[in-house]
Image (cartoon, grey):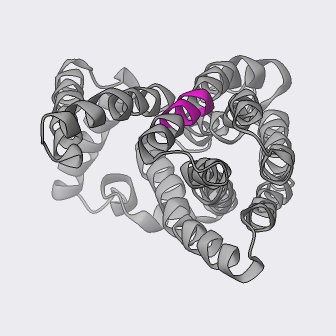
C-alpha cells in the first residue's frame, strides 16, 4: 500500500504537468496509468497458488458434504460456511476485538493522513504559492509520508515476533496518537512537515501490517478468510465517517489542528480494545 501511494504521488508529479502541457484532461491521464497496476494484479492473482492448509480443508469439507448427502450423521455446520460462525462463543470476542482494532486504525488513517494534502495547501497559501507548485509539494508530502509507511510495514512483523502482537499494536497506536496532534498543531513550515511526515506514516500506516498477521491467527483455517474479511472491512465501513467528521470539525473549530487532535483520540479505542485481545505470539495457526 505504501509503495502504491508513493508511485501514485510520482504519477501526479510527472503526468499532471505533462497532460496539462499537451491539453489532456489530467485526471483522465492518471486513470489511464491506473490500468497497468490493475493488469499486474490480475497477473499476480493468476500465479499465486492457494495455501496447502486451505486446500486440505476444502477437500475435507467436500468429503463431509458427500457423506452428509448420504447420511444424517454429519453436522451441517461442518459443511456449510455461514457468517454467524465467527460469532460463535469461542470466536465472538476475537471478532469484536479484530473489528474494533481495524476500525480505530482505519478511522485514524482516513481522518488524519488523508487530509495531508489539504494541510499542505493551508501551509503554502499564506505564502501566495502558485497552484502548480502547491500540486508538486502535495506530491512530495505524500511521498515523504509513505516512505515512513513502507518502513512501518516492513518492521511491524519482526517487532511483533520479538515483543508480541499486543505490545506492537500498542506501540504503533501510541505513536499515532502522539504524532498526529504534534505535527498539525506545531508545524508551520513545509520543510519541517516533510521531515516529520515519515514518522507519522511509520505509525499510522505501518499499523496495518499487523492485521494480516494477527487476524489470521485468531481463526481456524475454514473461517480464516471470512473472519479476516469481516473484521477488517466492517471496521472500514464504520470508519467511513472519519473524513466527514474531520471536515465537520474543521468548520466547527475553525482550525485543522484542533480537528486532527480531536479525531486522533480514536486510537484510544484501539488501545483500550487491546485489554481484551488475545496474545498469539508463538502460537501455531488454528486448524
- How many numbered marks have been drawn onto this rendered protein structure? 0
Let me know if residue 287 appears in the view. Answer: no
- Toward the front, the furthest residue is 128
Tell me if I can see residue 129 in this picture. yes
Residue 77 vs 131, above or below: the answer is below
Residue sitting nearer the eye, 279 or 117: 117
Which corner quadrant of the image does residue 61 belong to? top left
- Residue 80 is left or right of residue 110, and the answer is left
Q: Looking at this view, is 35 or 67 the one in front?
A: 35
The question of residue 140 being in magenta is answered with yes
**Nearer to me, 191 or 285:** 191
Residue 71 x, y percent position in the rendering: 23, 57
- Quadrant assignment, res 179: top right
Q: Is residue 151 left or right of residue 29?
A: right
Residue 52, horizontal then vertical, whole percent: 35, 21
Tell me the residue at 52%/53% (across/down).
232
Taking the magenta stretch, the answer to whether it contains residue 90 is: no
Q: Residue at x 50, y 43 (%)?
A: 134
* Image coords of residue 163 (percent x, y): 85, 24
Relative to 249, is 117 above or below? above
Q: Is residue 85 above or below residue 126?
A: below
The residue located at (55%, 49%) in the rendering is 117
- Examine the residues drawn in magenta and state their main secondary structure: helix
Please provide percent x and percent y for residue 103: 62, 60
What segment carries the magenta color? 139-145
Q: Is residue 146 left or right of residue 270?
A: left
Judged left or right of residue 9, residue 189 is right
| Residue shown at the point (81%, 18%) measured from the top left | 162
Q: Is residue 80 above or below residue 279?
A: below
Amino acid at each position: 500500500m505504501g509503495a502504491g501511494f508513493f508511485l501514485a504521488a510520482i504519477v501526479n508529479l510527472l503526468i499532471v504537468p505533462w497532460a496539462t502541457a499537451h491539453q489532456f484532461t489530467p485526471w483522465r491521464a492518471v486513470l489511464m496509468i491506473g490500468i497497468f497496476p490493475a493488469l499486474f494484479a490480475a497477473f499476480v492473482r493468476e500465479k499465486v497458488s492457494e495455501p496447502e492448509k486451505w486446500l486440505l480443508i476444502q477437500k475435507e469439507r467436500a468429503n463431509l458434504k458427500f457423506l452428509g448427502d448420504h447420511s444424517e450423521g454429519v453436522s451441517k455446520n461442518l459443511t456449510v460456511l455461514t457468517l454467524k460462525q465467527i460469532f460463535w462463543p469461542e470466536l465472538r470476542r476475537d471478532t469484536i476485538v479484530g473489528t474494533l482494532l481495524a476500525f480505530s486504525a482505519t478511522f485514524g488513517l482516513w481522518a488524519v493522513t488523508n487530509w495531508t494534502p489539504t494541510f499542505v495547501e493551508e501551509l503554502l497559501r499564506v505564502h501566495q504559492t502558485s497552484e502548480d507548485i502547491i500540486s508538486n509539494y502535495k506530491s512530495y508530502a505524500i511521498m515523504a509520508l509513505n516512505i515512513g509507511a513502507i518502513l512501518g510495514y516492513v518492521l511491524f512483523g519482526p517487532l511483533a515476533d520479538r515483543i508480541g502482537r499486543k505490545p506492537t499494536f500498542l506501540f504503533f497506536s501510541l505513536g499515532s496518537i502522539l504524532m498526529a496532534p504534534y505535527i498539525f498543531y506545531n508545524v508551520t513550515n513545509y520543510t519541517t512537515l516533510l521531515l516529520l511526515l515519515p514518522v507519522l506514516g511509520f505509525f499510522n500506516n505501518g499499523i496495518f501490517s499487523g492485521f494480516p498477521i494477527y487476524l489470521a491467527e485468531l481463526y481456524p483455517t475454514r473461517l480464516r478468510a471470512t473472519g479476516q474479511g469481516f473484521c477488517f472491512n466492517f471496521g472500514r465501513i464504520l470508519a467511513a465517517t472519519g473524513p466527514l467528521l474531520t471536515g465537520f470539525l474543521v468548520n466547527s473549530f475553525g482550525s485543522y489542528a484542533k480537528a486532527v487532535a480531536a479525531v486522533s483520540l480514536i486510537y484510544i479505542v484501539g488501545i483500550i480494545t487491546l485489554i481484551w485481545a488475545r496474545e498469539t505470539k508463538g502460537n501455531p495457526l488454528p486448524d
